[in-house]
Amino acid sequence: MITRRSSLVYGTLAAIWVLLLAWQTAEHARVKEAARDGLRHRAKDISNALGVVMRSVSFRGTIVRERLQPALNALIGQGDQPSELQSVRLLNAAGEVMASAGNPIELPADLPNGEKWGATSVVFENLVDLGTNNVVVPLANLPGDGRRRTNSLPPDAAAPPPVPPERPALADQPPPAFATNRPTGPRRRGLTPEELRDMREKYGLHDFIIVMSTQYVRELSNRDLWLRFMIGLLGTVAVAGYGLAWRSFGNTSELQIRLARASELNSHLKELNLAAAGLAHETRNPLNIIRGLAQMITKQQEANTEIRGKARDIIDEADRVAAQLNEFINYSRPRDLRRVPTNLASVLGEVVRALGYDLEEKKVRLDIHSDRLLVEADEQLLRQALFNLVLNAIQAVPVGGAIVLRTVKRNGTGASIEIADNGPGVPPESRAEIFKPYFTTNQTGTGLGLAVVQQIVSAHGWEIVCLPNEPQGALFRITGLRVMLKA
């Protein structure tokens, strides 16, 4: 039964467990997002480095792709270990690749917030502004031969420095050295505004996309997930442990209360037992007087036959009540054991001699198969237990029946006693109830004989069971006797 206090405790533990799991879930999400932010920052650093590289190799907004390509390859990295940066793409307005490095990638259809996270990689777009005026042109598509910078500049480029006028050559003097390195031939013109516009439309940078591996994010997320799982598991075990501890505490408290009540009831029963035993003892005295008076009546010659018959009935009933009182007093008596080496064969012989009249009256055949064993027992109580068992067997068998007494040595130091008869036996549903007080299958029995046997056996630490005897009858077996030595 769950009390209100227990419900409050269990509810608090459940709330703590839910809060712990929610906290660990939120912390895992925070760590995972922090790892992603770290990857975003590294991607931005890479894009900044690429912007510096592009500005260093550009001239008047024009970048030669062949000069940019080594820088892109350097960003991707070389060697056995894979780089975190997997791919770089520079696209024009039409989505064509102007420059690239790394593994081929399939660009997603949309990039919400400029990024797209996949299972093993993430795509970033335009982390920094590289400028829409930058133009990445293949070397072969530059105007002129691509080496005379001054002739390939657009019209808005700054004018080249003035060339000093030629001096007249002196006689017998060679011309100046720089004059031999100056280009000869016609100068090419610069780009027209229309050509420059077409070049920007065709080769102008529009999108900057990089692809980075999410391995570090996944590893960090998996480690943190394992850590959170262990914390959650330990928290679950702790909460369950507190719950079980509280349950055990409640059960212990309830058990202590029950034990206290049982102790009070036991004390009260002991007092009632003593009072009942005293009352039964005091009842025997007037009962003996009644029996004696009835015997005197039966011996009077002047009494008629009817009066003598009723007097004999009084004697029989007085004997029956006296027997019940004796058994009740015997059952209520405390069992203080005095363990001594006891000869089993000798005890069985005394029991048979005490019941000799009953055996002869019903013409019962009794066989004894006993080893001369010494066991540790209270001799008087053992004799009483065996007396009750043999008497119970005599009352159960028909006239001319058979009873077998047997002692068996078991497991070196153990022994058992068996009392078997060929009577009607005990029904299976009654074998567990037969040792309870006032339970009997005999109409003339008191129901305390086998209860006394159970008390004596339990006081010694033994066990007794009722089994069917093959082919007919009942078998009572006492086990747990400790053999001291052979007699």
Image (spheres, grey):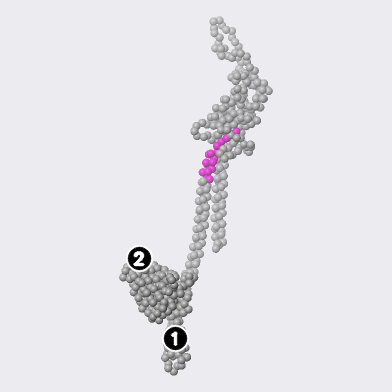
Mark number, residue 49: none
Q: Sort mark 1 into few (<14), some (14-19) or many (20+) by Cα contacts within 10 Å.
A: many
What's the distance in space between the residues labelled 1 and 2, CA to CA?
49 Å
Indicate the position of residue 307 as horizontal and vertical percent values.
Answer: 47, 91
Q: Residue beneath label 2, please?
A: 413
Name the spot of residue 411 as percent of width and height, x first.
Answer: 36, 64
The quarter of the image holding the C terminus is bottom left
Q: Quadrant of residue 383?
A: bottom left
Answer left or right for 227 relative to 367.
right
Which quadrant: the N terminus? bottom right
Residue 210 in percent (x, y) is at: 58, 34
Specify the farthest residue to the right.
194
Does 218 lie within the magenta span?
yes
Report the side of 166 relative to 485 (left or right).
right
The amino acid type of the residue labelled 2 equals: Thr
Instruction: Kindly identify which residue carries mark 1.
Output: 315
State the extent of the magenta-drawn residues as a range. 209-225
Residue at image position (59%, 29%) is: 99
Q: Earlier in the sequence, mark 1 or mark 2?
A: 1
Q: Residue at x 46, y 86 (%)?
A: 313
Q: Residue at x 45, y 82 (%)?
A: 320
Nearest to the observer: residue 355 or residue 87: 355
Q: Residue furthest bottom?
A: 302
Q: Please name the amino acid that badge 1 sits on.
A: Ile
Q: Looking at the picture, does residue 19 appear above or below residue 156?
A: below
Callout 2: helix, strand or loop? loop
- The kind of secondary structure element at disc 1 is helix
